[in-house]
DNA sequence: CCTACATTTCGGCCCCCGCCGAACGGTCTC
DNA sequence: GAGACCGTTCGGCGGGGGCCGAAATGTAGG
């Protein structure tokens, strides 16, 4: 058979190579960890995934070469982050496809605590997810600002709402304005895309939400409760 | 390290296992081939991917066990197809992410022929893609039936259009009505989701399009040219 | 310069997995 | 029932790749 290409489809080798990036448990852990949208050092990721630094280094090399991560060297540190929203979406899509074992119970108190905080409110790359993400998405939909019945798109009233709330929909590039991201705890779509990112960014900038712990979980502040009540009619009770 | 779980994230093992399904070139070829939405026999796939029947059999076993394919035994044949639209979407998403080598030139006359037919009009699982898919999507958008500027959703006028054209939007289940599918030859989104599937199905049923060859390529018939001109104002020239 | 620390490179180990051919079990046709 | 055909199972081969520890590189700070 020699050096002959075996596959009919020219896309297949690339597809297999891309999937191979995700097909290792350690690399998958890295990618899911980086889904918090921030930059981590190689050592942090190594400890987080319980592998030797040398192992982590090799994995990061592959992920960077493969275009999934970008790196930034600062002194003796190597910071990596997801390369772009497209990659983040791919990680989300794959994670959403995985059968969620909802039967599983938390094993430790610590896990139960962070687990419920994560379920309550967290970031998903650059937008808000968890029950908070669902609550916001539902409120937008219920008020006629977002349509989910014929797809997933802001309405004209929705565009005005963002404008009036002072949230800049930084509409640039080809990234879609809105996109449904399937939440893997709630199993329902929540607002992602440029609009979701703008909302999350504004919520953090205006201290409507603050990050808690060192991971993806966030918490709604009293300021945030007031803002969400005023702008979207969300009761504070629904945010706890 | 014993039997201890190494990963912090419970999703990671599942994600890695799912990705491993795609991470083999032969399996990737199978999945891309099955993206035509039809059922293939094990032998057909084996020949198409240039592997021994025994090899194909093992791969199909994994893909079926992994839930990506469903099988249907008929006599001495084993027919397989993509398990559901969700799987198809995942294959599309991964394929769209791979860098398209647009620089590559067709090597043979046969490849050039089928290649341009594929680029002109083809199916993508259960909806229409290629230039035809783009042309239809653009026409819908231009007539105010589909909004792409604030997401990707039909308008109320769009819902009426489907109704008046006699195309049944079989709205059932949780599948989204519309969804943008990124075309990997055109690099632009075209209509997918329930609406895209309904349109494709109707086009084939009403003989607006017919399949050519044994793969994904389709051709617009004279009936189809009339229908698209009448319903969407598309010039026949744009369909050739 | 010398120490501490983050990261990388290298060698070696081992397991996993894709591949094939040969043999076998069903199924259809004549 | 004989023969052709489709698919599966099994054994064995070979390569790729993840893992670690040890040593090397490079940076920050005394």
Image (spheres, coloured by chain):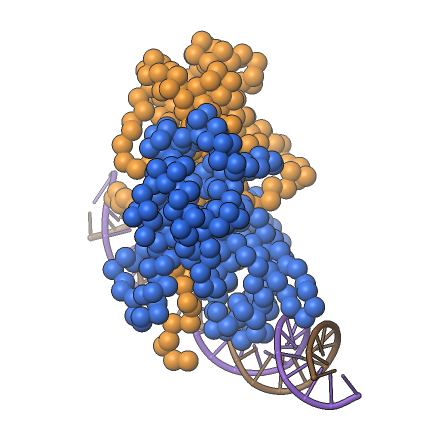
Chain colours: A orange, B blue, C brown, D purple
In the image shown, does B126 or A192 lie closer to the viewer?
B126
Q: Is residue A43 left or right of residue A141?
A: left
Percent position of residue A112, x then y = 61, 32
- Residue A65 visible in image: no
Vertical side of A142 occupied by A101: above or below: below
Vertical side of D5 occupied by B169: above or below: above
Name the image quarter holding residue B108. Answer: bottom left
User: At 56% across and 17% down in the image, what residue appears?
Assistant: A238
In the image shown, does A189 or A151 lie closer to the viewer?
A151
Quarter containing the C terminus of chain A? top right
In the image shown, does B180 or A169 lie closer to the viewer?
B180
Name the image quarter holding residue B169. Answer: top right
User: At 36% across and 33% down in the image, what residue appears?
Assistant: B141
User: At 53% across and 75% down in the image, what residue appears?
Assistant: B52
Quarter containing the N terminus of chain A? bottom left
Vertical side of A54 occupied by B41: above or below: below
Count of numbered circles on the image: 0
Percent position of residue A20, x then y = 44, 57
Percent position of residue B97, x then y = 38, 50
Q: Is residue C5 left or right of residue A220?
A: left
Q: Is residue B62 left or right of residue A182?
A: right
Percent position of residue B163, x then y = 51, 32
User: At 49% across and 21% down in the image, what residue appears?
Assistant: A141
- Residue A163 visible in image: yes
């Amino acid at each position: 058979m020699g050096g002959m290409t075996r596959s009919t489809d020219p896309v297949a080798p690339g597809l297999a190579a891309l999937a191979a990036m995700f097909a290792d448990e350690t690399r998958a852990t890295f990618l899911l960890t980086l889904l918090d949208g921030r930059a981590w050092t190689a050592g942090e990721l190594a400890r987080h995934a319980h592998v030797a630094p040398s192992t982590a280094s090799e994995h990061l090399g592959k992920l960077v070469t493969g275009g999934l991560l970008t790196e930034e060297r600062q002194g003796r540190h190597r910071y990596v982050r997801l390369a772009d929203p497209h990659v983040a979406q791919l990680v989300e899509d794959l994670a959403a496809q995985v059968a969620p074992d909802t039967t599983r119970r938390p094993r430790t108190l610590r896990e139960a605590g962070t687990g419920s905080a994560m379920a309550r409110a967290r970031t998903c790359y650059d937008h808000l997810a968890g029950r908070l993400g669902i609550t916001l998405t539902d409120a937008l939909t219920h008020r006629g600002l977002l349509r989910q019945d014929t797809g997933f798109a802001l309405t004209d009233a929705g565009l005005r709402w963002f404008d009036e709330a002072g949230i800049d929909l930084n509409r640039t590039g080809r990234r879609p304005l809105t996109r449904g991201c399937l939440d893997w705890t709630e199993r329902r779509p929540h607002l992602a895309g440029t609009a979701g990112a703008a909302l999350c960014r504004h919520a953090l900038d205006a201290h409507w939400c603050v990050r808690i712990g060192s991971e993806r979980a966030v918490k709604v502040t009293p300021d945030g409760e007031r803002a969400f009540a005023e702008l979207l009619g969300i009761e504070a009770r629904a945010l706890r």
